[in-house]
Amino acid sequence: MTDKYVYAFAEGNKDLKDLLGGKGANLAEMTNLGLPVPPGFTITTEACRAYLRDGKTPASLDAEISAHLAALEQAMAKKLGDPEDPLLVSVRSGAKFSMPGMMETVLNVGLTDASVPGLARQSGNIRFAWDSYRRLIQMFGKTVCDVPGEAFEQALDAAKRVKGAHADVDLDADDLQALVDAYKQIFKQHTGRDFPQEPREQMELAIRAVFESWNAERAILYRRQERIPGDLGTAVNVVAMVFGNLGDDSGTGVAFTRDPATGEQGVYGDYLPNAQGEDVVAGIRNTIPLQDLEGLDPTSFTELMRIMSVLEGHYKDLCDIEFTIERGKLWMLQTRVGKRTAAAAFIIAGQLVDEGVIDPDEALRRVTGAQLMQLMFPTFAKTDTQPLAKGIAASPGAAVGKAVFDSARAAERAATGDKVILVRRETNPDDLPGMIAAAGILTSRGGKTSHAAVVARGMGRTCVCGAEALDVTDDSFKVGTTTVREGDVISIDGTTGKVYLGEIPVEPSPVVQYFEGDAAHSVPARSGVSREDGGLNASGDTAQSPLVRAVDRALRHADEMRRLAVWTNADNAADAGRARRFGAQGIGLCRTEHMFLGDRRELVEALILASTSDEQEQALAALLPLQRADFAEILQAMNGLPVTVRLIDPPLHEFLPSLEELAVKDAQGRLGSREKELLAAVRRTHEENPMLGLRGVRLGLVIPGLFAMQVRAIAEAARQVKQAGGDPRPEVMVPLVGAVQELEAVRTQALDVIRDVDPGVPVPIGTMIEVPRAALTAGEIAGSAEFFSFGTNDLTQMGWGFSRDDVESAFFGRYLELGIFGVSPFETLDADGIGRLVRIAVEEGRAARPDLQIGVCGEHGGDPDSVHFFDSAGLDYVSCSPFRVPVARLEAGRAALEVGGSDTR
Amino acid sequence: MTDKYVYAFAEGNKDLKDLLGGKGANLAEMTNLGLPVPPGFTITTEACRAYLRDGKTPASLDAEISAHLAALEQAMAKKLGDPEDPLLVSVRSGAKFSMPGMMETVLNVGLTDASVPGLARQSGNIRFAWDSYRRLIQMFGKTVCDVPGEAFEQALDAAKRVKGAHADVDLDADDLQALVDAYKQIFKQHTGRDFPQEPREQMELAIRAVFESWNAERAILYRRQERIPGDLGTAVNVVAMVFGNLGDDSGTGVAFTRDPATGEQGVYGDYLPNAQGEDVVAGIRNTIPLQDLEGLDPTSFTELMRIMSVLEGHYKDLCDIEFTIERGKLWMLQTRVGKRTAAAAFIIAGQLVDEGVIDPDEALRRVTGAQLMQLMFPTFAKTDTQPLAKGIAASPGAAVGKAVFDSARAAERAATGDKVILVRRETNPDDLPGMIAAAGILTSRGGKTSHAAVVARGMGRTCVCGAEALDVTDDSFKVGTTTVREGDVISIDGTTGKVYLGEIPVEPSPVVQYFEGDAAHSVPARSGVSREDGGLNASGDTAQSPLVRAVDRALRHADEMRRLAVWTNADNAADAGRARRFGAQGIGLCRTEHMFLGDRRELVEALILASTSDEQEQALAALLPLQRADFAEILQAMNGLPVTVRLIDPPLHEFLPSLEELAVKDAQGRLGSREKELLAAVRRTHEENPMLGLRGVRLGLVIPGLFAMQVRAIAEAARQVKQAGGDPRPEVMVPLVGAVQELEAVRTQALDVIRDVDPGVPVPIGTMIEVPRAALTAGEIAGSAEFFSFGTNDLTQMGWGFSRDDVESAFFGRYLELGIFGVSPFETLDADGIGRLVRIAVEEGRAARPDLQIGVCGEHGGDPDSVHFFDSAGLDYVSCSPFRVPVARLEAGRAALEVGGSDTR
């Protein structure tokens, strides 16, 4: 904290955004580059914070403002509000992060009854003077004094009605002078005082209003959404007004130093002659393309081109600018590194490397995993069709298909070649075959972490969930007067959450086409297995699009830089193959429970219903060859790369029908004898909190032979693949371990089986770290584990005491509103709480066993911010769903450059 | 680890139990006291551990044994197995902790075919010689060579049949010689070799057999049960044999230095002339009272009395001894600090202080909370009645009453003065009124941490749970051919788990009678409130029993010594009053959810069903006066002491009927309109894992006004009590906080309400620490909390990922069997895992706020071992159920003396 609260533009620079805000810092930078910026000064965010904290401005602020205002007056050779030749200023907000439209600005500050004639005289434009005054009263009233905007709008409309005018410009100076009187009355009526006639008072009140706008409700909401901290405060820029509305030799415009949509170099922008910035926003007249300015005002145009070139060279990036021409004189009002589309981000970064402006590291810093993710989904072409409903955009992409309301039906129809959208009130593990078969999933209940959303994201399926307007039954859904039945075509947009009736044309992602195509590459495994092919550009140029080339280039540089390996979560050979094409270096999580669904459910039921150990052994023996075949396929698909198989995790009763369903049937006398047995088993195995019940390693220790069967299936599959000339690398992972004794008991059994099958294939045995106690006793557990894999989903559930199935719909929304979370801890790892457990386990696990291999296989493994955390925590790899593999590769590379995960906002 | 594996008795002492085992260390101690111990040596537990680890004895052991054997032979002037005059030895196990009957001993080692005649000659008793050989072959065969014991028994029986003999003593020397031949054949038949004729070989094999007996299955089970570590190993004592069976001037006996049941001084013991120790155990002849020895052998008797006096003076405690008289010569075979009843433990400790033998600290070390607990329950008089069934001894005590099968009926009958036993398949919160009304609770399902068990222990109700033999229906239970209906009298023993038909006479606990009586005392509150009365002995002697005096004395010394305050968990004025009489210094947990049951359930339903904020406010307004009255009563009962009220914690759907019940009724068309609404609400609020769902602070943040209503009720109750001249000290505790932002949001609301009601009554606001994340971010949370209270139940549930409702019956049994737990982490705090979270939170909470008050209100607060942990972790208080308050006081005192919680085993 310093005692200096005000900076002249010449005193700042672009790196002082914390203190001067983005706008102020960049105005300072431009000033120091010698570019034509209207003189002015910036009041710091510190002053704002002090004001918000204390309810008054710091004691020294007044004097500082006076000094800088004096300097400004001197530079402009005018005095603020001087009746003869008034200096007018704008008072503009400018926070560290851009919050477009969220905060306040007041223009024309300094104008009073007394100085309107002077302004008219100096500008030679009496209408302009009254219009400027009218605008001041309106903006000042609304912004500073909370006068309702409609009051002014109504008065303006009334004036136009009286005059028979269509637009503001049809009002002449007299009309505007009359309107000023009306506005002043409105002002007095709402505030109980006259419109302030003291220029300095106007300025000071405007400054405070900008400070206060930091805590306006819409600003708070915006920050929450954009994860901008709430305690930064805003700076205030006081800038000498320049006017683009003084005649045809004046005007205002915006421009980009290159095309923000594609990255192409050239002249991009819009210009509006004889207008102010607000007019452009209000859309009162149509703008003209920027290149047309060359004909209108070649001097200013040439100057602008020069300035844009200076700016891009200086910022080494695409910039956007706002400028005004006042009577042939060009003024720069703002610049910043420009927003761009995801595609342009990659292309521009590549171009700048080619142009020698930045190096490949810097290029990598300028693209994000979130941008890459966007580029990996198919998109709908533009459409005029009105959506039927809007739900939560749960898993991006654009899917079109026939609505089907039942999992088995979806699988059937898909098998005949139909594209289907599975529509359910909500999904559960039984719906998996249908979800796999479907092109997209639509539910009317559940949020971003509902079963549907999680599974869909995991599989890269498009999903819209929680579309509450839909009334979904077993064979149709209704929305308004529309009823959609099985076979009706619908389109769902997982990026916007929109649901359409009928087919909207879809465009596939060129990036995914590239990964999936023949040119697909894979990256070297950590274990040193050689790359299967050389990547796109290894064999020279191809006919790929600039976007694909740019993405490939960024990923390849990320691969060179990153310390973290990227593995994938895949439960079958198809997913494994796809992940490998996406660059996965191993499987970090192969779940086995999905292998127990479908036809095999009966075998699992037999296992649960077994009343003798003979029956139990028979049930297990029947599962063994099926599991062996599962594993053999996956080991083949990942030949030469590690495949971490997690032994069965969920409670067995998840494989049984629901209690409610059976109890109702029973009450109706509709249960057969096997179903009666099932009902008894459901009651017997019912758990109040299955998440915390008999699952994972507990199952393995309670049901003799279950884990041994799975380990045998893995070992036998490996032997089979090896005998066929392959290089199988299975690893066995034990879920839900909380104490080393649990792991040791399983390990002893497993080693016996492995030795028995084929001692020649080494099978490392490790553990999930997903129970808080496991993290807290990691030093002990490492003694019996060859690897750790963080199950950050469960670790989050238990560490926070949240059941993911329950809490999102119940209160996450409220928690986000209250600011208790900035983001759901299931999306981005909570570094302070859960992350502390991760760090403890890494540190103490490695202390006990220096060669311990450590990864993460929770969903966080593919989340950009979380990847940065895992890099900093010292993990060896992250494992994520196949679709997230490129994202994780990119972010792991960026993490190695020590960029904060969200720093490209 | 040293290289010395063998110690002569003269080389050891009583403090070397780790190395020499209890028996060896005490034999050494007696030897050094100059008492008549037969010469011998001890092979260390280290040698045992080495043998068990390596599968062979350490290389140097043989030579060491030879040297010590030579010294022994020299002392006895005999040679091991010498045909002329054989030295015989016993080879006895002796571990650090006594494991009675668990491990092996072989007597008469050294006897062979060749030396039997020599022994006969030297003893002048040929029958004795053959009998000794017969015993050796039998014990050696069984113990060392795994020959089935029945084989020898059958041969012995056959010999008796042939002879027409009733007892072993009826066999003469010839019979026994023939039996030896038969035994040798049996030995050869089962082992494939002749009985070893080399004395040294016999000894070495016997030593190994003792080593191996450490890992016998029964020994492992015993250790698990008694929480004895499995890696200690046993020592082996090789001792010259002395014989009590050489005639009427010989004999053997056991004795105590004072009465182990009451602590009274005097001669206590049994003597059997002309017999060996085994005969006493076998009960072949009746023993005589020890004092009768005075007539038989006054010299030995006098010597024995002298020795017992020496021992008690030396050990400063009650000792038990085993001795043998061989032809008028007294030999001490064993001594140790004697086991005693719980009552005797207190009385003896007091006596020894009075006698100036030990100081009050040492007396406190010699009694345990577990012993005190035993003394606080009523007991059944001895009975010949056969129990109907045996369940789990879930909450101790002896209860007799009429069986009732429904909670409401139990409350009704109790209101008419009946004593009832509530019998249910299992209990749930709805059964609470019946559980409160009942004298005891009996269930056929659930374990030690089932709802029934936990609530019963909390209330001090006798409970037997999981009596699986009972087939419980809604109005009766069947067991075998017996059917028990409502009104039939049954008796349940919560200390043994036994269930009886009819009334078994009950004796109340004199200790509880004392606490509950007029003489009840209270101890000073931490806040310095003066003691209400002076404790039993403050006003001089009373007519109390020695036991009550001894308990009172121990507790008062514990109160003087302890650093931890002891508070109680109490939800109503009756419990609060009782706890205060038991010495509680405050309420650490006043749950409010029990206040929402019974008649008030409808109001809670109204709150849940409310569809407008008006309806919600009405429901809350109806609850306010009821809650205010609840709190006023409790604040009055605890006048001057802190009362920590926990805001409502459980998910609201716990107050609704079950989904299954409503769904079945619905399917049968039997639902009224309100029930239909309820069914919809049940479906809407259903949670997969309610433990991890919408409860605690989450409820408070989601349902506007709920917490504010409770805080208002507390503040208004305090104002009311204060206005009536009382000294109310309420504290508000927020449950389930995981992030400081949650606490801060509640705190802001609560402070507003408190200020609004009466700023004159300060109400500290604090938080439970029961979510792992709260412990991990305690430094932040302490910024908004005036106190922490560890909810170690939930902390254990979440830290281990265990749902207490589910896991005990599902797999805790198996986990205890596998040794994954020594004890359930819900009974004794898991210091390594959950305890680490506690230590982190204490350390970082105090660092952030040095005056932070820290307690625990989970069930662990009354568990002896856990109290020691909480003392070492630096907590300010433990809070436990009223019945556990004296136990916690005692253990807190012992903890201050730095005694391990279980160290009096």
Image: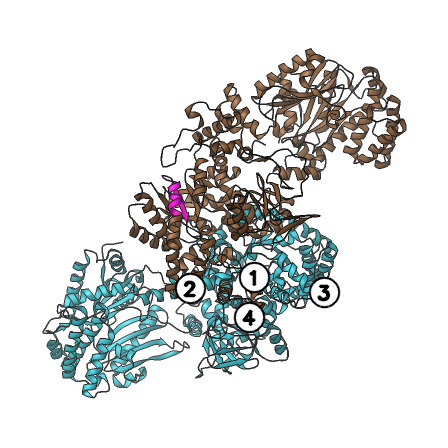
Chain colours: A cyan, B brown
Residue carrying label 3? A724
Report the amino acid beneath label 4: Gly
Q: Which stretch is magenta? A: B631-646
- Give the side of residue A820 with respect to residue A145, left or right: right
Mark 3–mark 2 distance (CA, rounded to whole Å): 67 Å
Name the chain under label 4.
A
Residue A644 seen by the camera: no
Residue carrying label 1? B661
Mark 3–mark 4 distance (CA, rounded to whole Å): 28 Å
In the current view of this chain or complex, which residue is farthest to the front? B416
Is disc 1 in the same subunit as disc 2? yes
Report the amino acid beneath label 2: Ala
Q: Is residue B812 above or below residue A21?
A: above
Q: Secondary structure at mark 4?
A: loop
Q: Is residue A242 above or below residue B522?
A: below
Q: Residue B602 bears which disc, if any?
A: none
Pointers 2 and 4 in contact (C-beta within 8 Å): no
Is disc 1 in the same subunit as disc 4? no
Mark 2–mark 4 distance (CA, rounded to whole Å): 62 Å
Residue carrying label 4? A535
